[in-house]
Amino acid sequence: MVTILTLIGYFIIPILIILIFNNFKWAKSVGTVIMAYAVGIVAALLGILPTGAEPGAEALESMQKTLMNVAVPIAIPLMLFNSDFKLWTKSLPKTMAVLIGGLASILIALLSGYFIFRNAGIPQFERVAAMMTGIYTGGTMNFSALGNMLEVDPSIITLTLTFEEIATFPFIVFIVAGGYKVFRKLLPAKTEGDTAETEETFETESFEDYHGMLKPKTFGRMMLGLLLSLGMLAIGAGLSLLITGKLNELVVILTITTLAIIASFSPKVRNLPKTFELGMFFILIFSLVVASKFDIHAIKGSLHILWFILFVMITSIILHLIICKIFKVEGDLFTVGHISLLCSPPFVPPIVEALGNRKVLLSGIVIGLAGYAAGNYLGVLIAWILGVF
């Protein structure tokens, strides 16, 4: 009975979070994923769900594991379908310099941080470092996918994301409060002969606009996207069974990521409405499940994860600044590019609004979409380098 009620709660609570997000301005600043993690952690701290040897704990854990293994693979194609990757070919050289420089700085910071902190006693550290590649290139989606793929302990996933938010939130506040002026002073005010200006624009509502999802016409076409996503998951599972003889997360995730990118080049798939938001719904389910498994006792001795995250974030910013300085990238383009990689594309419109410079909106979103696409591959690369496989 507890398992059934909890399962229902895992679906209802994300819906309530979306309703709050739609109707309260403060919720848009907090973000849906943070709210989902907050609810899950509170539930865990209150001891609402059975754990250990308590009655119903074993069945609950089995259900939670199933949800975690299914939610993210369904979400990945849905969140990639609406991405217009043809924009990569339309983006200008400086945009590509910011993208490549950002990815390089993140990888260098992660690898150097790993060797600095590898004797700090961080549990599953190789997997944590690889998982962090996802969140710093594609946000929560890739972070969650890599956590599943690398079989990272749920408590470590929650701790890592919690500490990452603790480190990132002040940086976002700094930027919005006027910190972008620092980057404008350090980098050129304008990139000569190469701006991100384009006739194509993205509205603020391009990401996480949940309004109208239940309209009959929209809902029907959105469900086509869900069926397509489930089909890709089936192909990934089948390919995994064929290659490895079992369900291998690595094969499944990389397969569906690749298929989703290919499918996004079709206008019919790309124009399916609200697939990004539907994908976010499944990410919220995953976030809620993971956070509800939070173990407060795991924090003891885990502050080294926070120091590692701070090192990676600060080092990647400095390296990215240096690279952008070399390529004479303007300060605003650097700002949206780094934020897009650090926090994912949904954060780009609010930052652009703070900058008062819509010319960098398209470039920021293109950089973030590239991070979505590349994050899982780069995470696997880091895991391979660190000897996880």
Image (spheres, grey):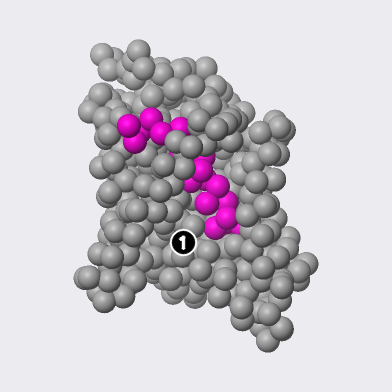
Q: Nearer the viewer, residue 65 or 188?
A: 65
Q: Nearer the viewer, residue 371 or 239?
A: 239
Residue at left offset 35%, top offset 13%: 199
Asked which quadrant contains residue 28, the reply is: top right
Label 1, secondary structure: give it.
helix
Q: Look at the picture and state if 18 lies above or below 385.
A: above
For the N terminus, the quadrant is: bottom right
Residue 69 x %, y %: 46, 65
Q: Is residue 237 left or right of residue 282?
A: left
Residue at left offset 63%, top offset 74%: 60
Q: Is residue 91 left or right of residue 66?
A: left
Predominant secondary structure, magenta span: helix
Q: Nearer the viewer, residue 39 or 58?
A: 58
Question: Is-magenta flag for residue 358?
Answer: no
Residue, disc 1 = 70
Of all residues, the one furthest to the bottom in this rendering is 53
- Mark 1 neighbour density, 10 Å: few (under 14) some (14–19) many (20 or more): some
Per the rendered image, the range of residues in magenta is 268-288
Question: What amino acid is labelled 1 in the image?
Answer: Val
Q: Look at the picture and state if 334 lies above or below 189.
A: below
Residue 95 x %, y %: 30, 28
Residue 292 x %, y %: 65, 64
Residue 367 visible at all: no
Residue at left offset 49%, top offset 50%: 140
Residue 53 x %, y %: 68, 86
Question: Is-magenta flag for residue 273?
Answer: yes
Residue at left offset 39%, top offset 54%: 230
